[in-house]
Amino acid sequence: MNPFEMVVAIIVVITIGRVLQARYGVIRTKHGENVHFRDDPAAQAENARLREELKAMKDRLAVLERLATDNNDSGARLDREIEKLRDRP
């Protein structure tokens, strides 16, 4: 095998390896570890559920921040707001 054929063979092997990595959704970080990035339906469903949960938590946090910074000293109003938060799923 002459040097030209060896270079072509190395390039073919590397290309096949890269195609297989892309096909199976694997990337290599700069530290050399393999990370799978392909999203299957279960992972997408989990991501959607977590996004909804995060949105609900942000809404609750906004209410709590408003309650904490509210200058109105109405205890009954504060109790109603806290009960609304407890009633949420």
Image (tube, grey):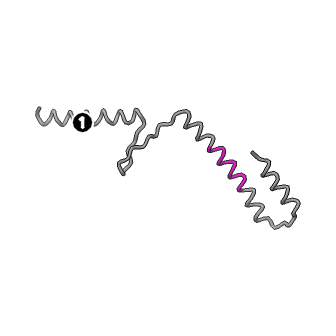
Question: Which residue corresponds to the image point at 38% horizontal and 47% vertical from the top-left?
Answer: 33
Say whether residue 53 is magenta.
yes
- Position in image of residue 20 (x %, y %): 36, 33
Q: Nearer the viewer, residue 7 or 80?
A: 80
Say whether residue 88 is magenta.
no
Question: Which residue corresponds to the image point at 76% horizontal and 64% vertical from the top-left?
Answer: 68
How many marks can you see?
1
Is 17 situated above or below 50? above
Quadrant location of residue 67?
A: bottom right
Q: Nearer the viewer, residue 9 or 36?
A: 36
Question: Which residue corresponds to the image point at 36% horizontal and 50% vertical from the top-left?
Answer: 30
Residue sticking out furthest to the left: 2
- Position in image of residue 28 (x %, y %): 37, 44
- Position in image of residue 47 (x %, y %): 58, 41
Q: Quadrant of the N terminus?
A: top left
- Mostly what secondary structure, the magenta segment? helix
Is 14 situated above or below 63? above
Stretch of the chain drawn in magenta: 50-61
- Position in image of residue 58 (x %, y %): 68, 52
Is 75 situated above or below 12? below
